[in-house]
Image: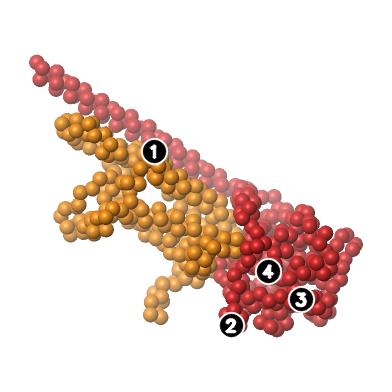
Chain colours: A red, B orange
Amino acid sequence: MENHTDKNKKAKEEVAVEQKIKRRNFISFSTFFVLGGAAFGGWKWLYNSPEETAGITAGARKPLRRALNKTELFFRKFYSNNHHVKTYPKAMAAKKVRVNSDIGMDDEGFKPENWTLSVVKSKGDVLKITMDEIKALPKTELIFSFKCVEGWDQIQHWAGVKFSDFIDHFKLNEHAKMDYIGMETPNGEYYVGLESESALHPQTLLAYEMNDQPIAIEHGAPLRLIIPVKYGIKNLKRIGTISFSNKRPKDYWAEQGYDYYSGL
Amino acid sequence: MKIIKEKHSVITRWTHWVNFPILTIMIWSGMLIYWASDTYTFTLFGHTFFHFFPDSFYKFFNIPARLAEGMAFHFLFMWFFTLNGILYFFYTIISGAWRELVPQKNSFKEAWQVLLHDLHIRRTAPPQNKYNAAQRIAYTAIIVMGFGSVITGLAIYKPTQFYWITWMCGGYNFARILHFALTLGYVFFFIIHVLQVVLAGWNNFRSVVSGFEVVEEKPDQMVKDDLNPTVNN
C-alpha cells in the first residue's frame, strides 16, 4: 500500500516537472520571438527611415543624422586644443603626395598668381589679402599623417601660416569668437564648415608649401587648408573665401550623408 | 526522473542575444567602411594569397559606394555594442559567473583533449562543469576581443583626441589592422560556435533561450544536490 502511494507521488512529481518545463519553455520562447520580432521591426524601421530634410546636412537617414550629432556632442567633451596630432621627421614625408579630389578646382584659366583671399568680416565688408601678405607672416611647418575618411593615411609635409596667427595678425579675433568658420573655393563649388575651436587648433594651417615647394595646382594652389584634427574632406584646397558665423556654414560632404564634424 | 537544471542567467541570455544582431550590424557597416579603402591582403613571403575582398564579395553583399551610410550605422551601433558588453562584463564579475567562465590552470591542456574528443580522435572528454575547457578559453577570448574592438575602434575614430589609446594600439595603421583582424576573428568564432551548437543539440540550445537544461537524475542524487544547491550556480 505504502509502495503504491510512493509510486503515485513520484508520477505526480514527474507530471509536475513536465508541466513546469513546458510552461517555462513557452514563456521563454514566446519572449524570445516577441523581442526578436520587435528588434527586427526596429531594424526595418531604421533601415527604411526617411532621409533627413536637405539643409546644412543632407543625405543621411533622419535618426542616423541625429545619432551622428549626439555622438559628436559626447566626444566633444574630450576635445582639446592641447591634444596635438602626432608629427614625424621630414624624411618620412611622402614624396608623391596622394591626390584624391579636384572638386571645386575645375575653373578654366585659374591663375594662382592673380589670386587674392577674401575674408568676409560682415556683409559688404570684405578684407582682401594677397599671397605676399600671407607669406610675410611667420611660417609653420607640419609633418603629420593626413587621414582620409576612406581609411587611408599618408605622412605629408606642409608649411604655411598657422590659422590662429593669421587671425591675430588681421585682427579677426572678435570674428573668430563666433562658433563656426566657413571656407570655400573661389568658384564656390567646394565648401567646408568648421567649429572655430578646431580651426584655431595650433596645428591648423593655411598652407602654401608642400615638401618645401609652392603647392601644385592639384594640391590646392596657391593656399589650402590643412586641419589635422579633421578628416581630409575638411582640408579645403584653393581657399577663395573665409567667413564667420554662429550657424553652421554649408559643408560639401555633410550634404552627402557624412558627419558634419568629421573630427579626429 | 527529469529535473530542471538552471544553466544561463537571464542577463547572460539577454546580452548574448542582443549582441548577436548588433555585432552583425557592426560587421556589415564595418564592411561598408572598409570598402572605401580595401587595401588588406594576406601575403606570405611575397605571395598574395587573398585580397580582402574580391569584387564578387562586394557584389554579393551589395556593398559599393556606401561609406557615409556605413559610418552612420557604425557610429550608432557602437554605443549598443559597448553598453551591452559593459553590462555583461559587470554582471559576470559581480554575480561570480566568471568562475565558470575564465580558463583555469588545466584549461589549456584540457582544451586540447576536448578538441581531440570533438574530432572523434579521443574517446573521453575531460570532466567539466558548466563549460568545458575549450569553451572557457573561447568564451573568455571573445570577451577580450570585444574589448579589443572597442579600444582599437576608439584608436581609429579619434586618433588625436585619444592619442594615448592610438599609441597603446601600436599606432593608427596597426590599430586599423587589429580592428579588421578582430572582425575576421568574430566570423571564425561564429562558424565554429554555430557548428558546435548544432552538434550539441536541442537541450543545450534551449538553455540559451530558456535558461535551463533538462537532465535525467536519480532521486537520491537530487537530495544530494538539494543539500548543495550552489554546485551549479
The verdict on a common chain for dots 4 and 2 is yes
Q: CA distance from mark 4 to mark 2?
A: 19 Å
Q: Disc 3 marks which amino acid?
A: Pro
What secondary structure is found at the residue carrying circle 3?
Answer: loop
Marks 2 & 3, CB-CB < 8 Å contact? no
Locate residue A253 relative to residue B23 in the image: left or right. right
Q: Residue furthest top?
A: A1
Q: CA distance from mark 2 to mark 1?
A: 57 Å
Reading the image, the residue beneath label 1 is B10
Give the chain letter at badge 4.
Answer: A
Marks 1 & 4, CB-CB < 8 Å contact? no
Reading the image, the residue beneath label 2 is A91
Give the chain letter at badge 3.
Answer: A
Q: CA distance from mark 2 to mark 3?
A: 23 Å
Q: Of marks 4 and 2, which one's residue comes earlier in the chain?
A: 2
What label does residue A138 carry, if any? 3
Reading the image, the residue beneath label 4 is A203
What secondary structure is found at the residue carrying circle 4?
Answer: loop
Q: Disc 1 marks which amino acid?
A: Val
- Res. A251 visible in picture: no
Q: Disc 4 marks which amino acid?
A: Gln
Q: Is residue B74 above or below residue B220?
A: below
Q: Disc 2 marks which amino acid?
A: Ala
The verdict on a common chain for dots 3 and 1 is no
Residue at image point 40% right, 42% down: B94
Q: Name the image quarter holding the N terminus of chain B.
A: top left
Q: CA distance from mark 4 to mark 3?
A: 13 Å
Question: Which of B211/B58 is in front?
Answer: B211
What secondary structure is found at the residue carrying circle 1?
Answer: helix
Residue at image point 18% right, 21% down: A9
Q: CA distance from mark 3 to mark 1?
A: 64 Å
In this view, the mark in front (2 or 1): 2
